[in-house]
Each structure stands twice: as structure tokens, then as C-alpha cells.
Image: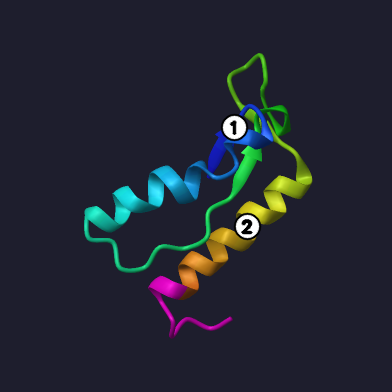
Amino acid sequence: MLIGGTMSHFLALDTALKPVLVALGAENILRGVFVLEKDVEQTPDGDFHIHPDIRSRLTDAVNGMVEKVNPLSPA
């Protein structure tokens, strides 16, 4: 997940992070999730509240990662 202040940060995953991962030898680079800063807020007790739509996208991304790491697990 990458949190950016504006949509102009949207390509940071592709243009900055992925080349570094490739240089470090990553073989399976999954799709990232870009989140606008306004969709994640810190509560006074230090926890984070994530917008429901973003939470759904993150859940999908994590499930995709689990499938990639363990392709034999039941769906």
C-alpha cells in the first residue's frame, strides 16, 4: 500500500518502488494499492480508520498475495 497526498502520486508504485524491487531480485511483484491520505485517518487513541472501499481493496490485494504465496490453499 502506498499512501499519497494527491492523485499525482499515483504512479509512484510503478516508477519508484517496482524498479527497486526488481533490482533486489523480486520475482513476483503484485499490484499495489494506492490510497489517498484523506481515506486513512488516525484516531486520537493511535489506531487508524480506513475507508470501507479502501479496506475492501486491501483485502483483495492480501488475498491475491496469499494465493500467489500458497497456490494450493483452498479458495
Along the horizontal axis of the image, is 16 left or right of 46? Answer: left
Check the image and report above or below for 13 versus 73.
above
- The percent position of residue 2, horizontal first and vertical second, equals 53, 40
Distance between the Cα atoms at labels 2 and 1? 19 Å
Along the horizontal axis of the image, is 58 left or right of 74? Answer: right
- In this view, the residue farthest toward the right is 52
For disc 2, the marked residue is 59
Q: Amino acid at mark 1?
A: Gly
| Residue 72 highlighted magenta (yes or no) | yes
The span picked out in magenta is 68-75
Q: Residues within 10 Å of mark 2 (few under 14, many from 20)?
A: few
- The percent position of residue 65, horizontal first and vertical second, equals 48, 65
Q: Secondary structure at mark 1?
A: strand
Q: How many marks?
A: 2
For disc 1, the marked residue is 4
- The percent position of residue 72, horizontal first and vertical second, equals 43, 85
Report the mark closest to the observer, 2 or 1: 1
Q: Residue 29 appears in which quarter of the rendering?
A: bottom left
Q: Amino acid at mark 2?
A: Thr
Q: Quadrant of the C terminus?
A: bottom right
Q: Secondary structure at mark 2?
A: helix
The residue located at (67%, 30%) in the rendering is 6
The residue located at (22%, 60%) in the rendering is 25
The first of marks 2 and 1 along the sequence is: 1
Along the horizontal axis of the image, is 48 left or right of 71? Answer: right
Q: Main secondary structure of the magenta part?
A: loop
Q: Which sits in the foreground, 14 or 75?
A: 14
Q: Residue 34 appears in which quarter of the rendering?
A: top right
